[in-house]
Image (spheres, grey):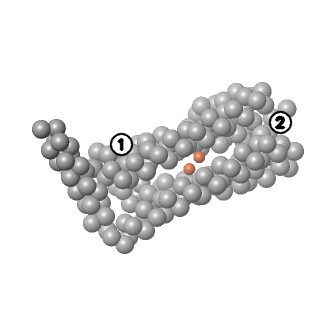
Amino acid sequence: MHEKSIVLLNQAVAEEVTALHQYMYFHFHCDDQGYDLLAGLFKKIAIEEMMHVENLAERILFLGGDVEMKASQDVKKITKVEEMLQLAKAMEEQSALDYNRWANECGNHADSVSKRLFEQLVVDEERHYDNYDDEIENLNRFGKEYLALQSIERSKARGNAAGTAQ
Ligand SMILES: [Fe+2]
Ligand SMILES: [Fe+2]
């Protein structure tokens, strides 16, 4: 039943796994560079993508398929913050576009539950898009000072923690 949906749902799993890997890679590098705020944002969204994999997997198994835990793409080794945010934004845009199309395809072959799942994912991907867009906006407005502030906040937090430890 619903073979076509199973294929589409697995394609979505592959996109989600790619996003999860890519955002965790960005998380590691933002953390390494001292940008706590952005590191936190990438991790938070990566966890949401992992939850998307879970939602898709449940539907695939319900339909009698199996979950292909393959990534659609390899991680891109980007370490400049501006380029990270541009890639992340483009990935969210692509996912929203794909899921809108796939929701319609599921509707066309009378699988309204998969259709609704894709529509729910679009809501989240558009929110992620917006989050990344806001960060790009901050970078454009405040430039390097925006990143410097994040490093200073970390140093302050460490200084305070050291102070209380004494
Ligand atoms: Fe997602
Ligand atoms: Fe997303």
Query: Which element carries disc 1, helix, strand or loop?
Result: helix
> Of residues 86 and 51, which is closer to you in this image?
51
**Residue 128 at what x, y percent from top left?**
54, 55
Mark 1 lies within 8 Å of ligand 2 (Cβ measured): no
What is the crowding at mark 1: few (fewer than 14 residues within 10 Å), some, or many (at least 20)?
A: some
Q: CA gap, disc 1 to disc 2?
A: 39 Å
Q: Amino acid at mark 2?
A: His
Kindly check if marks 1 and 2 are in contact, taking CB atoms under 8 A apart as contact: no
Where 75 falls versus 90 (above or below)? above
Q: Residue at x 59, y 44 (%)?
A: 15
Q: Quadrant of residue 67?
A: top right
What residue did someone put label 1 on? 28
What residue did someone put label 2 on? 2
**Residue 46 at what x, y percent from top left?**
49, 43
Q: Residue at x 32, y 68 (%)?
A: 143
Q: Is residue 142 visible?
A: yes
Image-based side of 53 in relation to 135, left or right: right
